[in-house]
Image (tube, grey):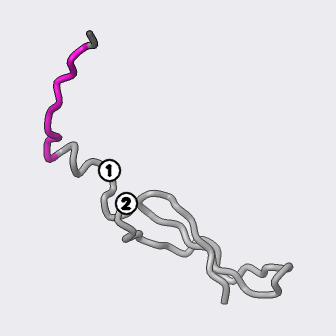
Amino acid sequence: MGDILPFKRKTAWEKHKGSSLCRDGFHKWKVVTERKFDVKQGRLVTEYCCQRCGKTKTELL
């Protein structure tokens, strides 16, 4: 027979551990590079970085 594993509920601290806003898609974007020129597309590019989790995104102008 296999071992029996006891299952327990997560505590409130474990449940909300980490940056839950970023996990739900509500990032806190900050401009890292503004007005950078993309040579291939011939457009200006703005780069954003989330202050909480560090995820980056780029936006074409």
In which quadrant of the rendered view does residue 32 lie?
Answer: bottom right
Q: Residue at x 33, y 56 (%)?
A: 19
Which of the two marks, 1 or 2, is nearer to us in this view?
A: 2
Residue 7 percent coordinates (x, y): 17, 30
Residue 45 percent coordinates (x, y): 69, 81
Residue 25 percent coordinates (x, y): 39, 68
Amino acid type at mark 2: Arg
| CB within 8 Å, label 1 to label 2 | yes
Residue 3 percent coordinates (x, y): 25, 13
Nearest the camera: 60 or 10?
A: 10
Labels 1 and 2: the sequence-earlier one:
1
Can you say whether 8 is above or below 55 in the image?
A: above
The residue that mark 2 highlights is 23
Within 10 Å of disc 1 (Cα), the crowding (few <14, some 14-19, many 20+) is few
Bounds of the magenta span? 3-12
Within 10 Å of disc 2 (Cα), the crowding (few <14, some 14-19, many 20+) is few
Amino acid type at mark 1: Gly
The residue that mark 1 highlights is 18
Give me the disc on residue 44. Answer: none
Give the structural element (helix, strand or loop) at label 2: helix
Nearest the camera: 12 or 2?
A: 2
**Mark 1 vs mark 2, CA separation in Å:** 9 Å
Membership of 7 in magenta stretch: yes
In which quadrant of the rendered view does residue 34 lie?
Answer: bottom right
